[in-house]
Amino acid sequence: MKRDIATAEEYLADIGPDQLPIVEKIRRALLAADPKMTEGIQYGMLDYPGLANLGAQKHYVALYVAPVILAKHKKNFPGVDAGKSCLRFKRLDQVDSPALEALIKDVRVHRKSKFAKK
């Protein structure tokens, strides 16, 4: 569900009580990965530049990351619906912190190596 919102604070205020704990848990992990990261809005969802996008959809919370990295980590999220570049969380208990932290770490390493080659 795309929102016409300009700031992360507005976005968070617009999320329903069922999804807010899921978004907050994933958001904390993303922000912890790089304390200097600027949180913004892109494509109508929360944006963590060079790392991920996070969106509360109608029936799930989607975390979008690099497809090549997600392919290696999908197995660490049993019961979570996954697309080519996203994980779709429907319940808070599906957000496994160690698996999420490992995924985010690999995304950061991938992004750094990708830009270091240029």
Image (cartoon, rainbow, N blue to C red):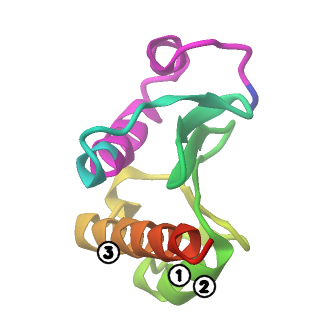
Marks 2, 1: nearer the viewer: 2
Q: Nearer the viewer, residue 73 or 20?
A: 73
Q: Nearer the viewer, residue 69 or 36?
A: 36
The amino acid marked with disc number 1 is Lys
Q: Which residue is mark 2?
A: 71
Q: Which residue is mark 1?
A: 74
Say whether residue 75 is left or right of residue 98. Answer: right
Q: Which residue is mark 3?
A: 102
Q: CA distance from mark 2 to mark 3?
A: 13 Å
Q: CA distance from mark 1 to mark 3?
A: 11 Å
Say whether residue 74 is left or right of residue 105. Answer: right
Q: Quadrant of residue 38?
A: top left
- Compared with residue 98, is residue 91 higher up or lower down, i.e. above or below? above
Tell me if label 2 and label 1 are in contact, CB under 8 Å.
yes
Magenta-tinted stretch: 3-30
Spot occupied by residue 12 in the image (x, y as percentages of width and height): 46, 21
Name the element at disc 1: helix
The amino acid marked with disc number 2 is Ala
Mark found first going from the N terminus, 2 or 3? 2
